[in-house]
Image (tube, helix red, strand yellow):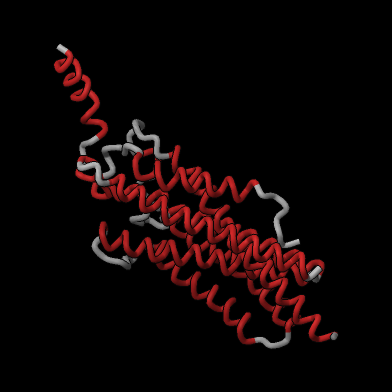
Amino acid sequence: MAKIPYKWYKILAVLLLGYTLIYGLLIPLPTDVGMLDETIRNLFYHVPMWFGMMIILMAAWIYSILYLQNQNPKHEIIARALTFTGILMGLCGLFTGMFWGYNTWGSPWTNDPKLNGVAVGMTMYAGYWLIQKSVDDGEKKARLASVYNIFIFPLFIALIFVMPKLAKFSIHPGSGESVNFKTYNKTNNMEMVFYPAIIGWTLFFVWIAEIRARYEILKQRKENEELFA
Amino acid sequence: MKNFLLNTVISDIAPQVTESLFRTSGKIYVVVGILTIIFTLITIYLIRLDAKITKLEKASK
């Protein structure tokens, strides 16, 4: 059940990521990216972390709703695996972003609306982890975590996606009055790597989440067997 | 003559391809190679992990 019955998505993930890793480093760049210079290549590695995180957390959100609807414990396990994997992607995005920011903006943490939103959002997801770790009763925990997840996901999206767009000023591209794809000169073909990168990274982390969910289901099954043995 | 043609071609392409320090030395291919090795090993590790879980799932059915 937790095992996705398609092998092709794993193959696709590996192929797209291989393409991203190799061609992302070799592709010629637009010449007008300013101080970003060659680090604009991080677009293929740092940015897909956030896109992938949002996609995976949305899947987790859907599974949390499904769990509350039909009380199938497998759905809760899948939602949990997806959430933790999504957060792992978010942390990758956060640390790569701090490193990138340190080298281009001169500071690992700036007063950018996107960064502040992420800080609050990550704290909310720390609350999700806290629920998972601190409630003993299995079913109570599952319900509590699902309801909590359903509340925090839209808030998180509002914080990291909607608010920075509404903000007057942001140094992140695509928010406030700052640059986006279209402002660079059209000689670039970065989209050719950018979109495959998003799909590849997301599918790769979905694979990791799948393995985690299958492990948790096996563990649960073993515990149940011991309980009724 | 041949040299002259080659030079013209190179000077036509060169400004677009290798303006930055990043690639002029050709050492970028070393980085690409290392990333490829790391990525290949991670992929093999994941495939093996996947296979192990599949085996456990079959055993516990």
- Residue A227: name its quadrant: bottom right
Nearest the camera: B34 or A83? B34
Write the residue at 74% across / 66% down.
Answer: B57
Does residue A60 appear in this view?
Answer: no
Q: Is residue B40 left or right of residue A221?
A: left
Q: Is residue B12 left or right of residue A30?
A: left
Nearest the camera: A124 or A38? A38
Numbered marks: total: 0
Write the residue at 49% across / 43% down.
Answer: A195
**Quadrant into which the N terminus of chain A falls:** bottom right
Nearest the camera: A56 or B25? B25
Looking at the image, the residue that sits furthest to the right is A228
Nearest the camera: A216 or A181? A216
The x and y percentages for residue A127 are 56, 78
The x and y percentages for residue A208 are 58, 62
The x and y percentages for residue B45 are 53, 61
- Residue A188: name its quadrant: top left
Q: Is residue B23 left or right of residue A64?
A: left
In this view, A1 is above or below A173: below
The x and y percentages for residue A95 are 39, 66
Does residue A85 appear in this view?
Answer: yes
Looking at the image, the residue that sits furthest to the top is B1
Write the residue at 42% across / 56% down.
Answer: B38
